[in-house]
Image (cartoon, rainbow, N blue to C red):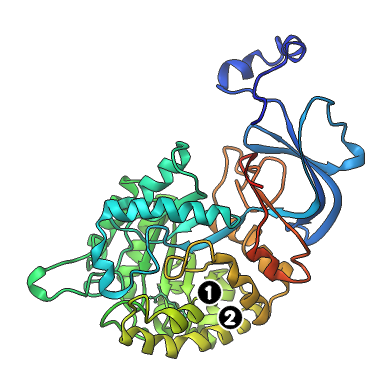
Amino acid sequence: MKNRTMKNTTLKNCLISCSIILMSSAVYAESTYFKVGTLIDVLKGKTLNNQVIEVENDRIISVSSANKVKIPANAMVTDLSAYTVLPGLLDMHVHLTSNPNKHGYRRLESSIPRQALYGAYAAKNTVMAGFTTVRNLGAAGFADVALRDSINDGEVLGPRMRVSGPTLCMTGGHCDNNLLPPEYDAHSAGATDGPYALKGKVRNNIRHGADVIKFTATGGVLSKNTNVNAAQFDSTEMSALISEAHDRYRKVAAHAHGAEGIKRAIRAGVDSIEHASLIDAEGLRLAKKNGTYLVMDVYVSSFILGEGEKAGILEESLAKERLVGKVQRENFKKAHEMGINIAFGSDAGVYPHGDNGKQFAYMVKWGMTPMEAIQAATSKAAELLDWRNENGQLNVGAIETGRYADFIAVKGNPLKDVSVLENVTVVVKGGNVIKH
Ligand code: ARG
């Protein structure tokens, strides 16, 4: 464990100048140091050799060449000189409270408390795989808020979470509960219709702890009786929902496969399109012009078509996946070639938590360089997330002074073979080595 006590000499030197800091901060820690063999600087898109990262409390306070730093003799040092070190990874689309073995009607077996407990298990697998920050897009009963807060309070091991609460959708839309016969009258909490009803849902999600708003702008693959091509919500509804969220300083993510729903959401000012599978030429142009992020889950199709049936996915959904999976990958390639903003998002929860990193190889196969794929999961994702400290600086996504000390170490060179990110050896979150 780290030495978190302050030494007497330091205390004396500090007594006057630091008294204000000491009074105002509960924990005062000495710096700890991480020696790094190769560091990936995602902001500059290059690597640096023999670096030292200095950490105080949970933040990075300096990154410098080893020959320029004088590490105090008694300091706590973690030696990562045999590794490539990069920022903790960000996944912009997960469902930690979803169990990938329970699809279709099996989804109905789990109560919300059960889903929250499953989330604790999924959170651990996720952070141990090197994903130190996730955006959770859709959870019943605010189980995601509970999980986020429990992780923050140190009760559960997991990534930093930014969460949406229940997904918003129209009656019978992709997020609604369409599985039970009408006499059950079972609806998801986020299902409603009309601009003001939607504003109310946005307000309620924020009231109960949402950091971000998620809605569905088209049908989905895994929902019963929805059409992936069909737009969901009209433009007035989308604009009302999005402006309400933006007024409250929340970003908005729209699930959308079909071309019309994608364009409608972009025109209404959405911040990211999730999936974006069937985006057309006009949609690509709009995304480029508006700077809209595309979060394209280009691995998940392999799981759905390979193992989905055993996991309970309905035949109807498998048929829809056959329509979107391949086209989505082709459109990912086009979007990347056009220089559209792309952030890493996996839809883990549909498939096992901790396998998020499998997507990197697909992003490279479909056109990105390994550096671009890594940036999509670090600096680019952090821009989309737009989560900032009191100085307005981004909290995560790069090994940079001021950001959280979240980084990972891998054996080998992910810039040559990006699949090495499927096996992360060391995970540091907030300066604590949680996996080595
Ligand atoms: N949650 C998404 C849906 O149900 C999964 C789509 C996965 N397929 C894909 N090709 N990305 O629509």
Residue 211 seen in the current view: no
Checking the image for residue 90, the label placed there is: none
**Dot 2 lies on which element?**
helix
Above or below residue 409? Residue 295 is below
Residue 115 is situated, as x and y percent measured from the top left of the image, at: 32, 56
Residue 310 is situated, as x and y percent measured from the top left of the image, at: 37, 79
Above or below residue 59? Residue 268 is below
Kind of residue sitting beneath label 1:
Met
Q: Is residue 9 left or right of residue 271?
A: right
- The response on whether ligand 1 sits within 8 Å of label 1 is yes
Q: Is residue 195 left or right of residue 239?
A: left
- Ligand 1 placement by image quarter: bottom left
**Dot 1 lies on which element?**
loop
Residue 17 is situated, as x and y percent measured from the top left of the image, at: 72, 14
- The response on whether ligand 1 sits within 8 Å of label 2 is no
Q: Is residue 391 left or right of residue 140?
A: right
Residue at left offset 34%, top offset 49%: 206
- Choose top left, top right, bottom left or bottom right for residue 214: bottom left
Residue at the limit of the structure toward the left, as seen here: 183
Report the front residue among 195 and 35.
Answer: 35
C-alpha span from label 2 to label 1:
7 Å
| Within-10-Å neighbours for mark 2: few <14, some 14–19, many 20+ | many
Above or below residue 179? Residue 327 is below
Q: Which residue is mark 2?
A: 332
Above or below residue 252? Residue 30 is above
Q: Which residue is mark 1?
A: 296
Residue 120 is situated, as x and y percent measured from the top left of the image, at: 42, 50
Residue 37 seen in the current view: yes
Kind of residue sitting beneath label 2:
Phe
Residue at left offset 54%, top offset 66%: 355
- Is tag 2's residue or tag 1's residue first in the polypeptide sequence? 1
Q: Are marks 2 and 1 in contact (CB under 8 Å)?
A: yes
